[in-house]
Image: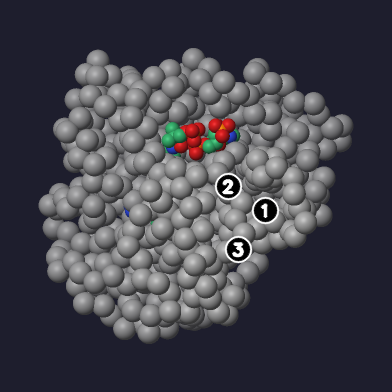
Amino acid sequence: MGYHALYQSWKDDPEAFWLDAARAIDWDEFPSAALNAENAPLYEWFTDGVVNTCYNALDRHVENGRGDQVAVIYDSPITGRQSKTTYSEMLDKVARLAGAMQSKGITTGDRVIIYMPMITEALVAMLACARIGAIHSVVFGGFAANELAVRIDDATPKAILAASCGLEPGRTVAYKPLIDGAIEIAEHKPDVVFMFQREECVADMIEGRDYDWNAVQEGVEPAPCVPVRGDHPAYILYTSGTTGAPKGVVRPTGGHLVALNWTMKNVYNVDPGDVFWAASDVGWVVGHSYICYAPLIHGNTTIVFEGKPVGTPDAGTFWRVISEHNVRSFFTAPTAFRAIKRDDPKGEFAKKYDLSGLRALYLAGERADPDTINWARDLLGVPVVDHWWQTETGYAVAANPLGIEELPIKVGSPSVAMPGYDVHVLDEGGNPMPAGELGAIAIKLPLPPGTLPTLWNAEARFRKSYLTTFDGYYETGDAGMIDEDGYLYIMSRTDDVINVAGHRLSTGAMEEVLANHPDVAECAVIGVSDTLKGQLPVGFLCLTTGVNRPHEEIIAECVKMMRDQIGPVAAFKLAVVVQRLPKTRSGKILRATMVKIADNQDFKMPATIDDPAILDEIKEALQTLGYAK
Ligand code: COA
Ligand code: AMP
């Protein structure tokens, strides 16, 4: 069946479509229904099914003869180390860690924070939680102690599973001081910390709370799988929203299994046994879905890559990994390709490797610019599939589903809606926009299985953030259009979220940090276009009257505060002091207009602007940073 027929078959009978997809999962009890609309507009899927995620990711493959197949390849150009772990070995590691967790009182429904770099043990930790029905929340290593503390207080974990350090090029990031610092700041105190000691940096342990990863497993019984209901939260993943408080996206167990498994063949066109590689980080949704869960659920080999697209050691690293491990489908963020292209514009490195096994490249996480897509396609000679999704959805809303049918590629578009998603472009009043015209992108409810049913401990925020603007729809926060062939174009965000090197960040959270500087009276942070990272944050600071210290000093302090409080991943290095900020008469800062000035785009003078002359001052300030030329 081709794409259009399949999409129509879903539309005609979504219940049958998803129950059929659910048959590819091994359930302890098959669900009596797919959709549960009892609490509409809050929806659930496979509510009364009983299932275990880890069983589907590991045990069943061992039982079905894949025990000796490599499940996880760890490839670390930073350390020069590699390892291969088979499905049987993964099962053993996971069951033993899960047993150790149980021995410390961690049980089904308890939350567990995972703070780990890109090593095999990060996947072991996630799957060990899944095995006993504990709800993990992975926190990205590039966040500072304060951000970790915010997540500890929201998720109230019983345990933290961590490694002693992460490795950035030229820098060892010791995790233990960050963890200790976060626990000190947080009101909630986890009972235990399991620490995987890496040889690059050995963590000091706190007696009675911290346990060595290996020692704590000695003599414990491996844990069996604990079946949970379909609506049991598999994990919470915090993502940036408009305010400083991150949103805890909840992932439900049943839908997660069914939907991710479905995407592996239909979207990524791999068969069980094939090597699939997503070069991201377990701290992001791409890492959850496509480094850990989906490839393993589907019986693929996944790669945990600890390195960067450039500099570890060079712009040929990706090609080495693809050729050495015979990667079939490869997924990364456009920014990684922009980094490679900048270092190796002619693609000389790619010529040194046999890339004939690669069948397609998938890009997501930010807008894929046509230059990057064309360059990648010419270099690799395979289809380059831009696909669009969010932490909230957990998998692609729109894609070119190569496993179903290769649709014509329109460069600049992530192609078409996947079955499960009824995507619309609406005007401010919620009316549909004609084909080709810009508006807010919204998805008709219900969202499909595996997408977020709510936010952790924050149902009211869930409703307000996603369900109230357009009645009967999920508001994506993205703006764009759909052309007459049904192809989507994602142009920008409608909120204050920015995207820096494929990392989703909140300018609101950054403003909260700047506002805490004693000399800053008022501030704004905007995302300006950047040829490498897509966007970069720029801060505007209005100083308290009477402050006459050098501006560079204050700016340097602000940059440090951002690094200390949000983390290096904020990539906040640019700020400028201004006398005033442009505002509407009601006091709203005109951030969107400032972005247009920075990016040299035409803009309409906002009718409600308080004093248009301020925009000239903003332009001059941006020019000192090299923007708004
Ligand atoms: N732990 C600690 N620090 C981290 C980190 C981690 N896991 N990840 C990134 N950082 C740090 C970096 O070292 C850098 O620090 P610096 O300011 O001291 O240089 C800072 O955070 C910013 O990182 P980043 O924006 O990633 O920039 P970079 O210069 O290190 O690398 C790219 C640029 C394009 C090579 C890199 O961003 C990249 O590979 N991006 C791919 C993005 C991706 O996979 N996104 C996931 C969504 S699909
Ligand atoms: P995250 O939740 O971190 O995955 O970020 C999701 C956001 O990244 C989306 O809402 C979009 O703004 C952006 N994004 C992700 N994929 C794409 C894409 N293919 N094209 C354009 N924007 C994208």
Residue 100 image position (x, y, % from top left): 70, 36
Report the number of numbered marks.
3
- The residue wearing badge 2 is 575
> SS class of the residue under badge 1?
helix
> Percent from the top left, x then y, of residue 263?
32, 51
Pick whichever, 400 or 234, lies toward us: 400
Q: Are marks 3 and 2 in contact (CB under 8 Å)?
A: no
The residue depicted at 40 percent of the width and 44 percent of the height is: 530
Q: Amino acid at mark 2?
A: Ala
In which quarter of the view is residue 461 placed? Answer: bottom right
**Mark on residue 580?**
3
Residue at the spot 28% in from the left edge and 19% down from the top edge: 349
Residue beneath disc 1:
514
In this rendering, does residue 388 appear at all?
yes
* For marks 1 and 2 on the same chain, the one whose residue lies earlier in the sequence: 1
Residue 28 visible to an observer of this rendering: no
The answer to whether the beta carbon of the residue marked 3 is less than 8 Å from any atom of ligand 1 is: no
Question: Considering the image in quadrants, where does the N terminus appear?
Answer: bottom left
Give the mark nearest the N terminus, 3 or 2. 2
Q: Are marks 1 and 2 in contact (CB under 8 Å)?
A: yes
Q: Residues within 10 Å of mark 2 (few under 14, many from 20)?
A: many
Of 482 and 579, nearer the camera is 579
Q: Is residue 289 left or right of residue 402?
A: right
For marks 3 and 2, give the CA distance: 14 Å
**Mark 3 vs mark 1, CA separation in Å:** 15 Å
Horizontal side, residue 469 vs residue 377: left or right: right
Residue type at mark 1: give it.
Leu
At horizontal 57% and vertical 64% (from top left) the residue drawn is: 581
Three-letter code for the amino acid on which mark 3 is drawn: Arg
Between 593 and 548, the one lying in front of the other is 548
Tag 2's secondary structure? strand
Between marks 1 and 2, how big is the CA–CA gap? 10 Å
